[in-house]
Amino acid sequence: MQKIIRIGTRSSELALWQANLVAKQLKDKGYNSEIVEINSKGDIVLDKPLYRLGVVGVFTRNLDIAMLKGEIDIAVHSLKDVPTDLPEGIVQAAVLERANYNDILVFKTDTDFLNNKNAIIATGSLRRKAQWLNKYPNHLVEDLRGNVNTRLQKLKDNNWNGAIFAVAGLERINLLPKNHIVLDWMLPAPAQGAIMITALEKDVEVLKICAQLNHQNTAIAVNMEREFLNKMEGGCTAPIAALATFEDDCVIFRGALFSLDGSHKLEFLERISMDEIKDAGKKCAESMLANGGDKMMFEIKAEMNS
């Protein structure tokens, strides 16, 4: 009898959509699966900013535990939520083809407030907050937590002018409002728009099955972005952005680091040939750290721990 692959996922509408996408792709390859819902601390504790929760992998830890206990065979994650260092025994099994990586601003009536000195924007992301304040230093940024549906409702219920979302999540569950603009100037989170499958390192059968779903170019790009993040972070949550895209036979890599208030930024742009992509994300981070990034990271850590 063929193995039924148990797919672990969070229970939000978006997470379930992603898990069902994996289930469909597995079925297309001839494999049966079932979905197991497991909530995370990030889903349960909504009254604190993410960086204040004090848990590495607030959206992934409970799925990791379930996998290590043998309750699920694979887990499906929004890759931008996954810590760059996976727990011992758990590995990246596949990355699906990347969707739109852009951020968008969802607004209530119009965008006239963008020309005003005072406005209120909501986001739970340090990266989005820092980039918004870098462009609109006089605006107020409020914290916004919850799943996509909850955040859209909070935007309606509060006196905010707009809120920032990843377009991929809204598009996936058909919740993209007409009242939105693409923030093409905002550099995304590393791996934004990509879905990752994890599995146990020792589960050779499942790893072989998942490898059939892997999208090579997406994996190359997001792994480079996550290498950059891993080297930059040093275990600290910080306003870090990165994007790797393909052009001809090269990868165009862009990275950025912002102060928490958005007043300072460091940017990096590199054209990397395909035969030089090994450790490229790490090398880009080392270059940024050597050119002022280390000082900025020290200041960010000090401010967050104060």
Image (cartoon, helix red, strand yellow):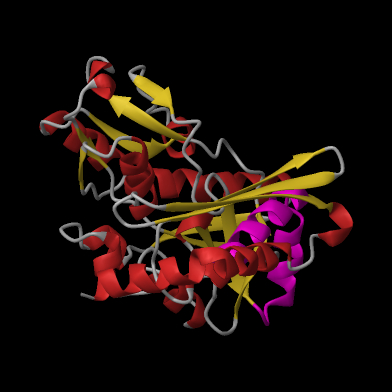
Q: Which image quarter is the C terminus in?
A: bottom left
Q: Is residue 99 left or right of residue 102?
A: right
Q: Is residue 169 above or below residue 44?
A: above
Residue 280 appears in which quarter of the rendering? bottom right
**Residue 5 appears at what percent x and percent y?**
60, 63
Q: Is residue 61 left or right of residue 80?
A: left
> What residue span does the magenta drawing correspond to?
201-229
Residue 159 appears in which quarter of the rendering? top left
Residue shown at the point (28%, 23%) measured from the top left: 114
Residue 156 appears in which quarter of the rendering? top left
Q: Is residue 236 above or below residue 45?
A: below
Near-viewer residue (50 or 19): 50
Q: Which residue of the protein is positioned furthest toward the front in this rendering?
A: 291
Near-viewer residue (43 or 283): 283
Q: Which image quarter is the N terminus in?
A: bottom right
Residue shown at the point (46%, 38%) measured from the top left: 186
Near-viewer residue (6 or 78): 78
Predominant SS of the magenta segment: helix
**Residue 9 appears at what percent x and percent y?**
44, 58
Residue 53 seen anywhere in this rendered image of the structure: no
**Residue 25 appears at what percent x and percent y?**
66, 46
